[in-house]
Image (spheres, helix red, strand yellow):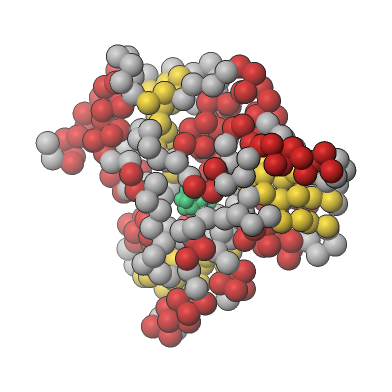
Amino acid sequence: MKMHELQAEILRLKKETNTAILAHSYQAREIVEIADFTGDSYKLSVDAKSVDADNILFCGVHFMAETAKMLSPQKRVFLANGLAGCPMAEQMDADLIGQLKAQEPDRTVVAYINTTASLKTVCDVCVTSSSALKIVENLESNKILFIPDCNLGDFVKRNFPDKDIKLLQGGCPVHASVTVHDVEKAKSAHPDALVLVHPECVPAVVERADYVGSTSGIMNYAIKSENKEFIIGTELSIAEHLQYECPDKKFYPLSKKIVCPNMKLTTLPDVYNSLKGINNGEAFEILMSDELIINARKCIDEMIRLGG
Ligand code: 13P
Ligand code: SF4
């Protein structure tokens, strides 16, 4: 089947099964094109709450579909490729964080949304890369334990030098692979380009950027900017999407190493097969106990309250 024929079939099945497709911006172009909602992890969390359909099919990684399930527990939520996980989400376990919390009960545990639902049950509030600064600013407490990404944590810490922010060693292996040398090389190849990076990159890379923000933040900045050239310091897909959105501008990937193998797992045939499998048990459904949903959702509700 040709790609556009598969896309047409997906649009038909979506209607037939009353399913909304949520796709993270790191998904392939052909998936973004047939999605009902696209964006960064904060936007998709808010969208998941307002979806008007019986089912949600999530194209992204496991913790994102889990978040959608927590925010829309009455809906059936499916992940288009059940093998797509985020390694950062698995880096810290709930028992360890629970112990640290018991040692310092007055320290607010702020969790990047890239965490499992079970870890979220012991955290006080979630943040995403686009909402972290606003949420930390709005927190009453000045004593914070920020997990798991020490690079995003460092970015937050630099913005709030008066807050006592403790970090642990965790992070995204894909973004952390970018080096200062990559930045210098890209800048010397494209001296007129602005450097836009995701805060999951290491501090020395973030320091050299003209703009630091989430995937949606980077896209919006480039779309609105008067500048014509940009070096994009996040997953390769973002430079490609931007090139479609702004054909009169030029986008260069900061490094060809920034490819997320998990985000890249989902294919258009996965989306098609998931829609076909929704009513016969073959699609990958996110199943969570009511207790887990109630306990893990608190810190997501708190994120939306403080970030709204
Ligand atoms: P965003 O919050 O920017 O969507 O980031 C999610 C993510 O996994 C980035 O690697
Ligand atoms: Fe996880 Fe990094 Fe992939 Fe984002 S890019 S999903 S943080 S591994």
The reply, left or right, for residue 255 in relation to residue 69 is left
The residue shown at (30%, 33%) is 271
The residue shown at (60%, 73%) is 204
* x and y, in percent, of residue 63 in the image: 52, 37
Q: In the rendered image of this protein, does residue 83 appear above or below residue 225?
A: above
Which quadrant is home to the C terminus?
top right
* x and y, in percent, of residue 135 in the image: 73, 47
Q: In the rendered image of this protein, does residue 46 appear above or below residue 179?
A: above
The residue shown at (30%, 14%) is 280
Residue 230's image quarter? bottom left
The reply, left or right, for residue 285 in relation to residue 40 is left
In the displayed orientation, state which residue is furthest to the left. 1
Which quadrant is home to the N terminus?
top left
Residue 276's image quarter? top left
Please tell me which residue lies in front, 8 or 248. 8
Q: How many marks on residues?
A: 0
Residue 158 visible to an observer of this rendering: yes
Please tell me which residue lies in front, 34 or 255. 255
Q: In the rendered image of this protein, does residue 101 appear above or below residue 223?
A: above
Residue 304 visible to an observer of this rendering: no
Please tell me which residue lies in front, 183 or 43. 183
* x and y, in percent, of residue 52 in the image: 48, 22
Please tell me which residue lies in front, 73 or 50. 73
The residue shown at (21%, 28%) is 9
